Amino acid sequence: MITVNSTFKYVNTEAGERIRIIELIDEFVYIVALDQSTSMPRKEIVETILQELESKKLIEIQDPFARVIDEKELSTLQKEKRDSDWSIIFKYGEKNKKELLEKKSRNKIFEKISYEIGLSLPKVKKLFSRYWQRGMNKNALLPDYINSGGKGKERRLSNAKVGRPKNANYYGEVIEGINITEEVKKQFDFGINKYYRTSKKISLKETYTLILRDFYSDTYKEDNTIKHKVWDKGRIPTYNQFYYWFKKTENVQKDIVLRESDKEFNLKHRELLSNSKQETDGPGTRFQVDATIADVYLVSSLNRNRVIGRPVVYAIIDVYSRLVTGIYVGLEGPSWLGAMMALDNMLTDKVEYCNKYDIHITEEQWPCKHLPEIIIADRGEFEGYSVENLINNLNIKIENTSPYRGDLKGIVERSFRTANEKIKHKTPGAIQKEFRKRGDKDYRVDATLTLTEFTKIYINMILYHNAKIIASYPMEKEMIADEITAAPINLWNWGIKNRKGRLRTVDREVFRLNILPKGKASVSRAGIRFKGLYYSSDKAIREQWFVKLSVRHIEIVYDPRDINKIYIPYDNGMKYDECYLIDTSLQYKDCLLEEIIFNEELNVELKEKHLREQNQKDIDLEKEIENIVKKAKSEKAKNIDYNKTPNQKIKGIKRNRSVEKELNRQKEAFKLGENNDIPKTGKVIDLKEQPEEIKSENGKTRIMELLRKKRDERNNEG
């Protein structure tokens, strides 16, 4: 990024010119050279500078003139000289800025200043040059002798080797090395970036060797293999020189990020300049929530010989006091369902909760059943649609941590580590090693505890934690004055009494309604449809939803573990209408949502399979119809009477239909008592052209008489 007063250096030139940005106007940038005795502004295109930065031809450097000057250390003469020069800059600099930047108008302004103040033109130019070159501030105009000495400055090198003389080695050789010029530094930077700052994690010594191979060796071929011969020691930089310049320009953060990962740096090497408590002002300001999989295998409550795996443990901890405010031990998650159960426990009366596990406590031992102001959580479980309800309806802020940054929830993470360590030493079925060697006993076969028994252990560990002193807690002086020890329960009670505290209460039913997953249901005459199931509700019947159909879609909430009912929230999520399964879907009563979804997906697959088969049948049917029609057209072509007009052909449709119907009836008539298996030969009735007297209004009667006559003749012949 280009900003006014920033300094840069060209690394693609031997001179290595250093420049300062003194102004940005539209698409132009004005710069001055820093290494000249007098330098006037020159204009460049901003895009050109950006391209040079992009290609690393130009790199940003630390301001070589930046320094902190104590006014007390300046002599009266220095101050007077500085202030005198500053008055000239102040009077003419800003007023004539644009003219001074442009080469065409600059000299006229300098001449005007020279004339008005009685200072020679070269001195006026040198004054403004110093102002631009040295940082464009008042102290930039101090005389040069304030910087006497060269400590920390890089020297302009000649051919002579600088530095202290080297001692001879064991063999009497004196290896001087070479001067570390800008070119050598560029080679060092190239090698460090290419070889050292990579995931291969090669050593600094090996990086040095590769730099010698690339820049200080001759290449030759031997046995069809390319080899390198390093130059003699007087023509190459020594490892000590390379190491010195590496440490001088070392960027620890960049090295760790490129060699390890950004995650590794943030977890283990980042600066620790604050603690979590500094972000709170009392109990309830921030709760941290996280989940872990406990390092112990459990067994089924129905049959202790069946191992059911490791439980998922959720914990919610108040940042200010370190008190555990909610837990969940179960088999759900890590997922929103598990987080939802932990949030529900956060509002639970802990005395009642512990009684369910035959653990009897007083409210003073575990007093929390409140909502916080902010919840710090992982992105996974707390980035869903249910979180919106917590934010919008209950005014709880959610702060999601970055991926792989469990350290941002350090308090709850430490709680998990402590719990797992205690579990490993006390409970059968605990994981003792990350990897088992061949022949080691499988710790899973030792699993003994059920989920309920493990929960009882975890509750007791929480009660112990709430009463235990936290050695590293940053105590406030008021706490010490009140003789408070750093146990979470003491800190919680003291914070509620003496600090703001952001604890809030809410009806538990309303809270559950707001943390349950949301969904969309459609409304039709058949009922309220959700996940393939149909529901009804008193409100829907009362308002005639299924008759008027004024409501097409509704927002609902549901519990995936009990799909027998769904709920329609209203009044901004503070009330709800209960929906129940109707007869159409009672077959799915008490089924898990996963089972219902599976059946729905299976039904869709079967329909798709049938549809593919149906498509083939449709094609076959179309083909068969075409064949029959084609054959019929061929038969009709044989009997076409070309002497008849179209009107004559369609005349007498009723009579023709009657004759055809009687013939069809004779074919369809049931012949009871006859052996239908014996084929009989029928006699064809020749319907010749009828005389005109038959074609009368009573044509039907005459036709019937004719048919009966023909039938009698056939019977007599038989």
Image (cartoon, rainbow, N blue to C red):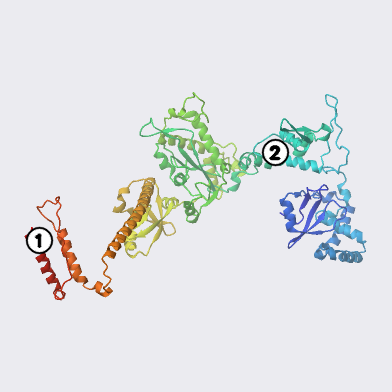
Q: Could you tell me the amino acid type at mark 1?
A: Arg
Q: CA distance from mark 2 to mark 1?
A: 112 Å
Q: Could you say whether the residue bearing mark 2 is in a helix, strand or loop?
A: helix
Residue 42 visible, this angle: yes
Of residues 442 and 15, which is closer to you in this image?
15
- State the residue at coordinates (18%, 65%): 661
- State the residue at coordinates (43%, 33%): 298
Q: Determine which residue is flagged by label 2.
A: 195
Q: What is the number of the mark on residue 714?
A: 1
Do the CB atoms of the residues marked 2 and 1 lie less than 8 Å apart? no
Q: Dividing the picture into quarters, in which one does residue 95 lie?
A: bottom right
Of residues 656 and 50, which is closer to you in this image?
656
Quarter of the image with the C terminus in it: bottom left
In the rendered structure, the answer to whether residue 329 lies left or right of residue 674 reads right
Of residues 289 and 502, which is closer to you in this image?
289
Could you classify mark 2 by the number of other residues whose Cα lies within 10 Å: few (under 14), some (14-19), or many (20 or more)? many
Q: Position of residue 292 (x, y in %)?
A: 50, 39
Of residues 83 and 504, which is closer to you in this image?
83
- State the residue at coordinates (87%, 32%): 165
Q: Tally the numbered discs.
A: 2
Q: Could you say whether the residue bearing mark 1 is in a helix, strand or loop?
A: helix
The residue most toward the left is 716
Quarter of the image with the N terminus in it: bottom right
Q: Could you tell me the amino acid type at mark 2?
A: Tyr
Q: Position of residue 541 (x, y in %)?
A: 32, 60
Q: What is the number of the mark on residue 150?
A: none
Q: Position of residue 9 (x, y in %)?
A: 78, 49
Could you classify mark 1 by the number of other residues whose Cα lies within 10 Å: few (under 14), some (14-19), or many (20 or more)? few
Q: Position of residue 106 (x, y in %)?
A: 85, 64
Instruction: Kindly report which numbered mark, 2 or 1, lies closer to the viewer in this rendering.
Output: 1
- N-term-proximal mark, 2 vs 1: 2
Q: Is residue 693 above or below residue 440?
A: below
